[in-house]
Image (spheres, helix red, strand yellow):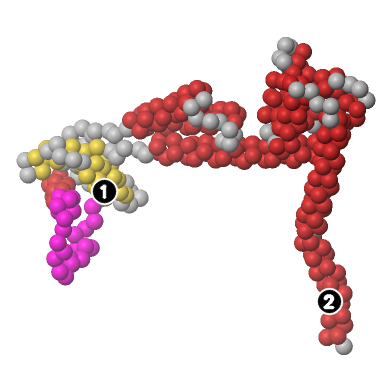
Amino acid sequence: MWVHIVIFIILLCALAGWEKGWIPSSGIGGKEGIRLFMVVAISGNLLGMILTAGNGRQVYPQGYRLEKEDTGSYEKEFMVSVDGEEPVSMYIQVPEKELEEQEEPKQDKKLTREEQAQKDLAEAVTRYNEQQNDPDYYYLPDKLDGKKIQWESPADTSGMLLTGLFLVAAMAILVMKGREEQVQLQKRYEELLMDYPGLIMKFTLLVQAGMTVRKAFQKISLDYSRKKKSKPRPAYDEIRIVCYEMESGVSESEAYRRFGERCGQAKYKTFATLLIQNLQKGSRQMADMLERESMEAWEERKRKARVLGEAAATKLLVPMIMMLMVVMAIVMIPAFLSFYGT
């Protein structure tokens, strides 16, 4: 039972650490992964505790007897304690094997202290039942050489096994959620890269048309809201957040700084730094700098598209080989059949 209590304490400490921010949740499935992990782990430990409490060790009363069955002999495990010593495991067979069936070893094997104690106890049980000579029941003696014998049922470990299975399942869920989170982050990273050339080109055109930086952001956000499809675009969603922050009273420089940090990529951070420098110092060459940045972004996107095309061609290589093998089989099999048929 104490093992379940220790597990509960560890889980609660881990949950408190996640809530306080001492243990980072990123990379392990986020809040959803932690919530599922805790639900599964705590539920499994609670069920295991209930099962362990209901199937604890049972001390048998004096004169306990086992009923003999007509179907044949059977074995039952007991924990035996002699005169208050440490209990040892012992199997009792009902009814006991006949002594004639047991072959005496040719050489005496040196037994350990525990094995000798078990042997003496088994012989005492056999002698006790020979004295009782009851055809229906098999008795467990209360004393051995004047020492008190206590018979107990072994503790059921199914509760611990159930708790272990639930903990393994909780860890598997946490790992799966962590992988899903990594896939989503990688997908967002790639989408931000794909959105950057179009975003910087549109922003450059608006600035060159005479709009201020703030007005350009609001124009891009408004157009995205009107044309927003079922699939959101991360870069344009971040533009909308920038506009909401500026409307709520956040300064422009702070909003642009947060924009670069949320995107988390060097290109967006460079873009945000350029906007902040324009606000602080002013830059007559901002339009030219934006135009150069947009050209570089388009070249980078072209290179990315070529890489993706090459990767797609590599993935198609295996299906093409399989199709070639099918075509060769269609051509060769009839030829072989006609050759051997003649």
Name the mark on residue 180.
none
**Residue at 44% of width from left, 25% of height from top?**
12
Q: Is residue 96 visible?
A: yes
Query: Residue 280: image x %, image y %?
Result: 74, 21
Residue type, mark 2 in image: Ile
**How many residues crowd around disc 1 within 10 Å: few (fewer than 14), some, or many (20 or more)?**
some
Q: Is residue 179 left or right of residue 15?
A: right
Mark 2 sits on what residue? 333
Give whichever of 219, 291 is nearer the camera: 291
Q: Residues within 10 Å of mark 2 (few under 14, many from 20)?
A: few
At mark 2, the secondary structure is helix
Mark 2 and mark 1 in contact? Answer it, CB < 8 Å.
Answer: no
Which image quarter: residue 295? top right
The structure residue drawn at horizontal position 87% and vertical position 82%, both measured from the top left corner, is 338
- In the image, which is nearer the foreground, mark 2 or mark 1? 2
Range of residues picked out in magenta: 96-118
Q: Amino acid at mark 1?
A: Tyr
Q: Position of residue 133 (x, y in %)?
A: 17, 47
Where the N terminus falls, by quadrant?
top left
Total numbered badges shown on the rendered structure = 2
Magenta span contains residue 282: no
Disc on res. 91: 1
Residue 293 sits in quarter = top right
